Amino acid sequence: MNPKNSTPPKSGAARRQFLFDSARMVCGVGLLGLGLGFYAKQAKALPALALRPPGALPEDDFLGACIRCGLCVRDCPYNTLELAKPETPVATGTPYFTARNIPCEMCEDIPCVKACPTKALDHALTDINQAKMGVAVLIDHETCLNFLGLRCDVCYRVCPVIDKAITLEMLPNERTGRHAMFLPTVHSEHCTGCGKCEKSCVLEEAAIRVLPPKLAKGELGHHYRVGWDEQKKAGRSLIDESKMLDLPDRLPEGAQLPGHYDPASGHTAPARGLPGSEAGAIPSLPPGLGSKP
Amino acid sequence: MSQIADKKRIGAEAVESKGWLRAHKWLILRRLSQFGILGLFLLGPLAGLWIVKGNLNYSHTLGLLPLTDPYVALQALFAGHVPEKLGLIGLAIALAFYLLVGGRVYCSWVCPVNVVTDAAGWLRDRLGIKGASSISRNTRYWILGMTLLGSALSGVVLWELVNPVSMLHRGLIFGMGAAWTVVIAVFLLDLFVMNRGWCGRLCPVGAFYSLVGRWSPLRISAPLRSACNDCMDCFEVCPEPQVIRPALKGEGKGVGPVILAPSCTNCGRCIDVCSKEVFTYGLRFNNPASTDTLVKVQPETK
C-alpha cells in the first residue's frame, strides 16, 4: 500500500517513529472510514417515494453495482430518471424517479436497462411487464373519490396493465343504500410500479402511491397453507369431514347472520348475498353439513 | 502588497527567455484538454449534440467507445459486482491508456477538480500564504485502501458517496445541486489549510491512478539537468515537488534523469517554467545514469 514506508527503518527510534506514524495514519483514516461507513448505511435507506429504474437490483446490491454514470438517465426518452444530487436523500449520483413528477412510461425496449454498463439494472429483464419498480397501494381510503362512491376511476384507466394490475371491485354503497362503490384494487403480481396511477390521481395528494415492494407487501408465515388452495390442489378436503363438528353459534341477543344456517335450531337466516360473490346469492352450506340433523 | 510585488513570479525567467506562450505551452494544452473533455460532455445536455454520454465514471462516445473509470469499477468489484460487457471493455481501454501515458495524466489532463486546486495553489502563491498544516503525502494511499476495504465491508461503492471529482463533473453535466459546497471546500482547503492538500495528500482517485501509472513508459525527464541554474521554479510550480529532486539532482548518485515517481502527474509545468529547457516529455527506458555528456553548461554561480 505504502511504498515509502514498506521497509521499516533500522534504528530503534526511527522504528518507533514509523510505528507511531502508521498508527496515527490508521487511526485518522479509520475514523474517516467509520464516518463513511455510517453514511453508507444511511444511504441504503431509500426514501419510500424514490423509485429505482426498471430491473434495478435490491437497494443493498444496487449501491454496490451502480457506478453513477447516468447513462440510464440519458437514454430515458421521457426524462423520467434523474441522478441524485448530494442534498437529495438518495445515494449521491444514483438514478431514481418520483412517480408523482414523471412516472415510468414502460418502454417496450427498456432503453435504460440496455444503457447500463453494470448489472445494477438487470439485463435479464426484457419484458417491461415483468418489472418490479414498486407496488401501487391505494393508501388512503378516506379521500379516494371511488371510495367516496364517485366514479373517478382515473388510476384504473391509466394503468398500462389495466384489469390486471388494477381492477375495480364492486361493493354496495351503504351510505346511499342503492349504489355500488367501484374500489380500485391493486394486484401486486401484475403491478410493475410504473407510477402512472400515482401521477394521474386527481387529488391534491395522491391517494394511490407506488411504494417499494418491501414496504407495500406483507408476507405470510412460511408454514402457512391457505386451506381452499390446498383443497383445490388435492382435489378434496384435507380434513376428514365426517368428524367435523359444528357447534351452535352464539350470537348477541337479537343479532342475525344473513344466510346463516344454525344447526342448533335447524333454521337458516334470510340471505343477503351479493351478486358475483363466491358464495352466490344464497351462501351454500358448509361442506359436510348439507343435510339437516 | 510590496512583499507580493517584490517576490519574483514563478517562471518569470522562462517568460523572458522563451516568451509567454512557450512558457505556458503545456499549461494551455492541459487546460484545453480539461475544458475540451468537459465541453464534449456538455454538448449533449446544452446543445443536444450527443457525442459523449455519461460522465467520468463511465461514458459512451458516439455509441462506439465505452470508457470506464477503473477506480470506481474496482470499488464495485470489491463490493461484489462485475460490470456488464460494455463496462468491462471500457475498463480495459481506460486501463490500457493510463498504463501507457501515466495514471496521473487523469489528474492533470482530465480531472475538473485539478482546475480548482490549481486555482487555489495559484492564489495561495499570489497571496503569499505560507505554512499552515500539512499531512503526509502518503495519506491518500491509506484512504485508497480504506475505500476499497470499506466498499467490501459495506457493499456500497464507498468513495462515490462523497467523491468531489465525480460530484463536480456530474454536477456540471447533470445538475449541480449542493455539489458546489464540496468544490468550495476543496478550494478553501488548498488555499488556507494545506498546500496542495486535496490532490497532493488526500484524494484516493489520484492515489489509485498513481499506482496504475507505476510503470508507464511516458514520463517527464530532465536530460539537460546539467544546465540547471537552481532557480527553484520547477519545485515551486510542481504539484508534487518531491518527485523532481531524485531525477534533477541525481547525477552524482548515478540516478538517471527520468522522473520515475508515480505521483508525478505528467502535467509538464516544470517544462514550461524552466528557462534552461532542462525538462522534456520522454520515455522511462531512456534513462542513462549520467547525462553530463549530453550538454556541458556550467551552472550559473549564485
Image: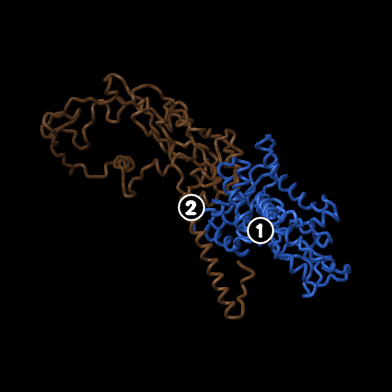
Quarter holding the C terminus of chain A is top left
Q: Is residue A289 left or right of residue A109?
A: left
Which residue sits at x=66%, y=52%?
B120
Question: In this orientation, does residue B93 appear?
Answer: no
The label on residue A39 is 2
Residue displayed at 77% across by 49% down: B28
Query: Which corner quadrant of the image does residue B177 belong to?
Result: top right
Spatial CA span between label 2 and label 1: 25 Å
In the rendered image, the vertical position of residue A164 relative to residue A70, given as above or below:
above
Say left or right for A155 vs B37. left
Q: Position of residue A217 (x, y in %)?
A: 38, 42
Label 1: which residue? B209
Q: Which chain is brown?
A: A
The answer to which of A215 and B151 lies nearer the viewer is B151
Identify the residue at image location x=31%, y=20%: A179
Amino acid type of disc 1? Tyr
Query: Which one is nearer the viewer's eye here, A138 or B84?
Result: A138
Q: Nearer the viewer, residue B97 or A267?
A: B97
Chain B tint in image: blue
Give how far across and how far down residue B64 sits, in percent: 70, 44
